[in-house]
């Protein structure tokens, strides 16, 4: 094994050297301890100590060797520190600022092209951030209004009779159909009849100078529907329900005003065949006589 080079500069300690002396802190007596013991009992006064004061009056060769080793180590440490200073000591704090200093130091304002010095107190707004993939604008689609309830008194498109006039009031069969009837109960719940029936829509207008009123027509002697064989159809009965007629029982009919509509339902087990005759007593509109209409057999249709 190669011998360490630095051991050549440390002199060997001769055997038989004296150990450091112990001194009694009570009487001042000093002595050399025997063996490996520290000899914490004073031979002069017999006092015992937890520790003894070591006296090195004559360090001898061992002390010189220790001083030489400490001196060589100090020289080596100074040499290493000098080399480190030569390598890293040439940089100044201005050339290598710390991270905190670099972050805290504000940027110098850009030089003005017009030759005027910019005011450092004026802050410039940040440019807007433009996304890489902008989303297309959302188009607002207007929703359709909620569906309105169909007025059951409004006649459906199709066949309509000629006008019949008595004095100042004229009447018309606006439409006919063989379909389920629109119904309503006492709680206002609307529905349709289970079986189809004969439905006839009426229209009245006032062409005279005096106001009139229209009382609701219902199947009776004042409102009859006769089949081709001369039989009269009876009115349809819906039990706890009735025809959905939102208008009052008696409606005003002013001169030149809006027409008044009505709905009548007759019972029929099958679709009507042939020409039917509808007769209305004009007393319900304040006139004398009857309105008579002929309904052809080919105009009945399902609604």
Image (cartoon, rainbow, N blue to C red):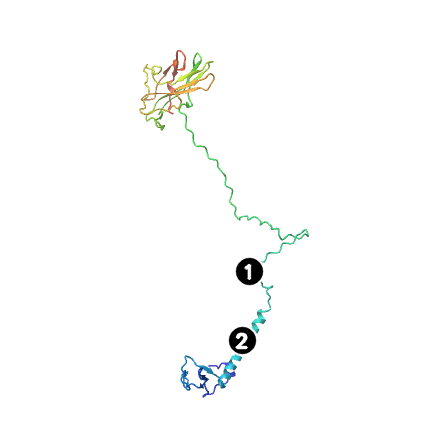
Residue 274, quarter of picture: top left
* Relative to 137, residue 249 above or below: above
* Relative to 34, residue 147 above or below: above
- Tag 2 secondary structure: helix
Residue 264, x across and y down, in percent: 37, 20
Q: Is residue 291 visible?
A: no
Indicate which disc, 2 or 1, sits on the residue closer to the N terminus. Answer: 2
Residue of label 2: 77
Q: Is residue 100 visible?
A: yes
- Tag 1 secondary structure: helix
* Relative to 229, residue 9 above or below: below
Image side of residue 68 versus residue 170, left or right: right
Depth check: 143 or 258 in front?
258
Q: Residue furthest toward the right?
A: 115
Q: Quadrant of the C terminus?
A: top left
Image side of residue 22 versus residue 110, left or right: left
Residue 19, quarter of picture: bottom left
Residue of label 1: 100
Q: Residue furthest toward the bottom?
A: 16
Residue at x 57% of width, y 71% of height: 85
């Amino acid at each position: 094994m190669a011998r360490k080079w630095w051991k050549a500069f440390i002199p060997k300690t001769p055997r038989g050297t004296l150990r450091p002396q112990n001194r009694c802190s009570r009487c001042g007596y000093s002595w050399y301890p025997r063996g490996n013991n520290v000899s914490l009992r004073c031979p002069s006064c017999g006092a015992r100590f937890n520790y003894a004061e070591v006296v090195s009056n004559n360090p001898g060769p061992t002390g010189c060797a220790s001083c030489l080793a400490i001196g060589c180590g100090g020289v080596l440490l100074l040499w290493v520190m000098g080399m480190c200073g030569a390598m890293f000591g040439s940089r100044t704090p201005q050339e290598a600022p710390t991270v905190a200093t670099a972050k805290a130091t504000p940027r110098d304002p850009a030089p003005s092209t017009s030759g005027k010095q910019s005011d450092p107190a004026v802050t410039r707004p940040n440019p807007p951030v433009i996304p890489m993939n902008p989303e297309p604008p959302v188009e607002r689609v207007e929703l359709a209004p909620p569906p309105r309830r169909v007025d059951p008194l409004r006649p459906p498109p199709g066949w309509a009779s000629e006008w019949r006039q008595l004095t100042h009031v004229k009447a018309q069969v606006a439409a006919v159909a063989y379909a389920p009837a629109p119904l309503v109960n006492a709680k206002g719940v609307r529905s349709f009849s289970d079986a189809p029936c004969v439905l006839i829509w009426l229209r009245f207008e006032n062409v005279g100078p005096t106001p009139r009123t229209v009382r609701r027509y219902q199947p009776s002697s004042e409102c009859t529907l006769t089949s081709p064989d001369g039989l009269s159809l009876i009115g349809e009965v819906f039990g706890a329900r009735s025809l959905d007629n939102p208008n009052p029982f008696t409606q005003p009919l002013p001169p030149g005003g809006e027409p008044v509509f009505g709905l009548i339902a007759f019972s029929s087990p099958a679709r009507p065949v042939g020409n039917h005759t509808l007769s209305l007593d004009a007393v319900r509109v304040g006139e004398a006589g009857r309105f008579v209409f002929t309904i052809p057999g080919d105009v009945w249709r399902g609604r």
